[in-house]
């Protein structure tokens, strides 16, 4: 007895400011969402769009590409060292 959902990988989740968001299971869709967020973030000077979309798009892409993931990890380490007193 094999269910259709047994062979799928578990859904990936992104934690942003302590909240978890579930990403789509499709790798292509995750990459597309990340690229669109970065692209519209570059247009952040326009109304409604904002520069906040760039880091969010890079966060989504960091789950797919090792180069972006390394930069995210470096940033997290730097941020934690900066937050700790002394």
Image: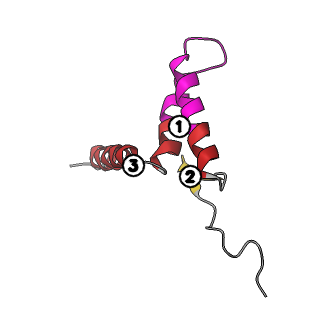
Identify the residue shown where x is 61% and y is 67%: 9
In whole angstroms, how far apart are the C-alphas of marks 2 and 1?
A: 10 Å
Could you say which disc has been placed on residue 33 in the image?
none
Q: Secondary structure at mark 3?
A: helix
Question: Which of the 4 quarters of the picture holds residue 20?
Answer: bottom right
Residue for badge 1: 56
36 up-or-down from 61: above or below = above
The residue lying at 28 percent from left, 43 percent from top is 82
Q: Is residue 53 visible?
A: yes
- For disc 3, the marked residue is 69
Of the image marks 3 and 1, the number of the one nearer the N terminus: 1
Image location of residue 84, percent across then percent down = 29, 50
Q: Residue at x 35, y 50 (%)?
A: 73
Q: From this viewpoint, which residue is outermost toward the left?
A: 86
The part of the chain drawn in magenta is: 34-55
Which residue is nearer to you in this view: 5 or 20?
A: 5
Mark sitting earlier along the chain (3/2):
2
Mark 2 lies on residue: 14
**Image location of residue 71, percent across then percent down:** 34, 43
User: Quick check: 15 left or right of 26?
Assistant: left
Foreground: disc 3 or disc 2: 3
* Above or below: residue 40 compared with residue 85: above
């Amino acid at each position: 007895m094999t269910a259709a959902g047994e062979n799928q990988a578990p859904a990936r989740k992104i934690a942003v400011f302590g909240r978890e968001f579930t990403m789509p299971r499709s790798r292509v869709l995750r990459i597309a969402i990340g690229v669109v967020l970065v692209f519209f973030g570059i247009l952040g000077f326009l109304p409604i769009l904002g520069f906040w979309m760039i880091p969010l798009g890079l966060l989504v892409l960091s789950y797919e590409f090792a180069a972006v993931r390394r930069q995210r990890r470096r940033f997290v380490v730097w941020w934690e060292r900066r937050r700790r007193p002394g």
